[in-house]
Image: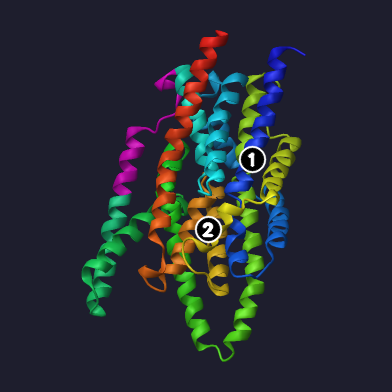
Amino acid sequence: MDANTVIIIAGIVIALAFNFSNGRNDASNTVATVIATRALAPRTAILIASVCCLAGPFIYSTAVAKTIGKGIVDPGIFTPVLLFIGLIGAVLWVNACSHYGIPVSSSHALVGGLMGAGLAAGGISAVFWPAPELVGWTVVYLACGAVLGAGIMAVLAAVFRDSLKFYAILGAAAGAVVTIPILMILDLFVIKGLLAILLFICVSPMLGLIVSYIFTTILTKIMASAKHPTKMNKWFQRAQIVGSGFQAMSLGGNDAQNAMGIIIAILIAAGFVTADAELPMWVIVLSALAIALGLLSGGWKVIKKMGTGITRIRPYQGFSASMSGGMVLSFMTMFGVPVSTTHVATGTIMGTGVTRGAGAVRWGAVRQMVTAWILTIPAAAAVSGICYLAARLVFGF
């Protein structure tokens, strides 16, 4: 067995190990609320979610895998060694954060790892930077959405004689967040690759918050008018199981594709498959199995942080958060955007908490997580870039 074959096999193994780490960190978010409300025992919740996570890649498309494998760094510079080192930065960052119970994005860690290795190997031109025109139109659409949202909410504030400033700011944020997704649904604006990934670091948690806030507000009114709130509470505990399963399945459909994208890129770089080849079934199966096993191993610190560290969750709020998270993740997967389940789940949990007032959310815990999100791509890029340069210095490739 020659050195190149060893690197290829090692790269595939590390890609699967990355998905396993993804399961321990990102996938743990899918069971946090169902455990926090005691709708299910921890190990039962994890087992059900693992099965749903395993099924995800077979239900959704493989568009996310294509973005990871071909849409961030020029595939022309890919070598098994470069991809192997790119994974190293992502795996080290995710496992370090998991050790300290900090929920981060494995998807974004992988993006950072690939960018760092790509920049070290091929320079600035190796990364598919977004076109200035596309960035410009994105800013224009965001600004138009913010102005429209602020105007609508200002009118509502005047009608209901409420705080004009608060509602205008809220409307601006909501308008900016929903504009791009609406344009994507209507097929009026196409955004892919690195710009989509960077944009949705901000959009996905806010979108999760908005969807969850609306959903929870509706459920709160239903609970308030219920004649038998205890029975309703038990019903929502059962419904939470469905919501958690849906969120786990949508996570499997998005995050499990990270390893698929890397493995197919390794196979293309090694000359085993062509650039336009479809994903082999064994790649899909192993990637899905790796993330399911990672979830099954239990990321207990992350589960605790998400389930009890942000806000207090009741069964109907847990159901709302899980269903909202599943809907947002499904939407992103449909358009091939690798997003963070952590970002989405944090947004949905915050959305349920905000329905009881801003004071119901532990903003200190949120700030810690947001800081980790911001650092994820550059930190993983720095680690993989340094590893690549060090390996080239030692081995001379």
The span picked out in magenta is 123-141
Q: Is residue 229 visible?
A: yes
Q: Which quarter of the rendered picture does the N terminus lie within? A: top right
Query: Amino acid type of disc 1?
Result: Asn
Q: Is residue 134 magenta?
A: yes
Image: 3 above or below 330: above
Mark positioned earlier in the residue sequence (2 or 1): 1
Q: Nearer the viewer, mark 2 or mark 1?
A: 2
Q: CA distance from mark 2 to mark 1?
A: 20 Å
The residue lying toward the viewer, choosing from 182 and 17, is 17
Colouring used for the render: rainbow
Q: Residues within 10 Å of mark 2 (few under 14, many from 20)?
A: many
The residue lying toward the viewer, choosing from 226 and 29, is 29
- Residue 364 in the image: x percent, y percent? 39, 57
Q: Which mark is residue 19?
A: 1
- Residue 148 in the image: x percent, y percent? 28, 61
Q: Which mark is residue 139?
A: none
Query: Amino acid type of disc 2?
Result: Met
Q: Which quarter of the rendered picture does the C terminus lie within? A: top right
Q: Residues within 10 Å of mark 1 (few under 14, many from 20)?
A: many
Element at badge 2? helix
Give the residue at the far bottom of this rendering: 227
The residue lying toward the viewer, choosing from 24 and 145, is 24
| Residue labelled with disc 2 | 306
